């Protein structure tokens, strides 16, 4: 049974890195590919993250650091543009596991949920709005746009999840390994500075 779980984790990790799938989608696809019953217990995200890191170290160590750097630098650009909304970077770009296939996920904290949309309109930015599950499981609006990334020579998806100002405390909660699920602009700039030193 343990061998099967390891195979499931390895397969899901490959889908995340090579195809940019979400954790949930990669686990479901791995279950299907391996011919397992649909009710198969899915591995937890901490174990999957560990396998993703191992996969990157084995197969992408020559390209992934540069791609991650490019995505983090683009995240800084958008965080500065939207600084009044206390942006926090989340997901694979924050956690250091992103490749060029990953999108940038920012959390914005607003007094007025429409203020971020007004800011984008004022800047002439086109975006789509879709509902998604938020930090505490609540439904939040996500503003999705495309942004040109010069180092990657392609467009990258940028997704802005809109939260109430009070939700910012939940953004800084550490996970089971003591890592925060998101980071502020200052935290990201320090991370980039440490990378260059």
Image (cartoon, rainbow, N blue to C red):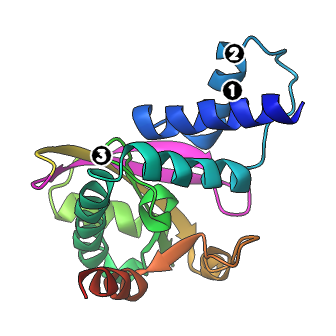
Left-right relation of 158 to 12? left
Query: CA–CA distance between discs 1 and 2?
Result: 6 Å
Q: Which quarter of the image is occupied by the C terminus?
A: bottom left
Q: Establish if 177 lies above or below 35.
A: below
**Residue under the point 9% across and 54% down:** 150
Pointer 2 local density, CA inside 10 Å: few below 14, some 14–19, many at least 20: some
Start-end of magenta stretch: 127-151
Depth order, front residue of 17/115: 17
Query: CA–CA distance between discs 1 and 3?
Result: 22 Å
Give the labeled residue for mark 1.
28
Give the labeled residue for mark 3.
100
Left-right relation of 178 to 86? right
Q: Is residue 196 magenta?
A: no
Left-right relation of 165 to 48? left
Give the labeled residue for mark 2.
32
Depth order, front residue of 137/95: 95
């Amino acid at each position: 049974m343990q061998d099967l779980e390891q195979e499931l984790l390895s397969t899901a990790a490959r889908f995340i890195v090579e195809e940019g799938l979400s954790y949930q989608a990669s686990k479901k696809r791995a279950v299907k590919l391996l011919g397992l019953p649909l009710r198969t217990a899915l591995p937890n995200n901490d174990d999957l993250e560990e396998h993703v890191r191992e996969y990157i170290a084995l197969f992408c160590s020559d390209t992934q650091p540069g791609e991650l750097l490019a995505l983090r630098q683009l995240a800084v650009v958008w965080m500065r543009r939207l600084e009044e909304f206390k942006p926090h970077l989340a997901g694979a770009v924050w956690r250091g596991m992103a490749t060029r296939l990953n999108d940038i996920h920012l959390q914005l904290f607003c007094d007025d949920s429409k203020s971020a949309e007004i800011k984008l309109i004022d800047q002439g930015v086109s975006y789509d709005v879709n509902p998604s599950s938020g930090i505490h499981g609540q439904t939040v609006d996500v503003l999705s746009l495309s942004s040109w990334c010069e180092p990657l020579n392609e467009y990258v998806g940028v997704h802005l999840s809109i939260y109430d100002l009070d939700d910012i405390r939940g953004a800084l909660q550490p996970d089971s390994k003591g890592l925060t699920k998101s980071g502020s602009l200052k935290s990201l700039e320090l991370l980039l500075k440490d990378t260059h030193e």
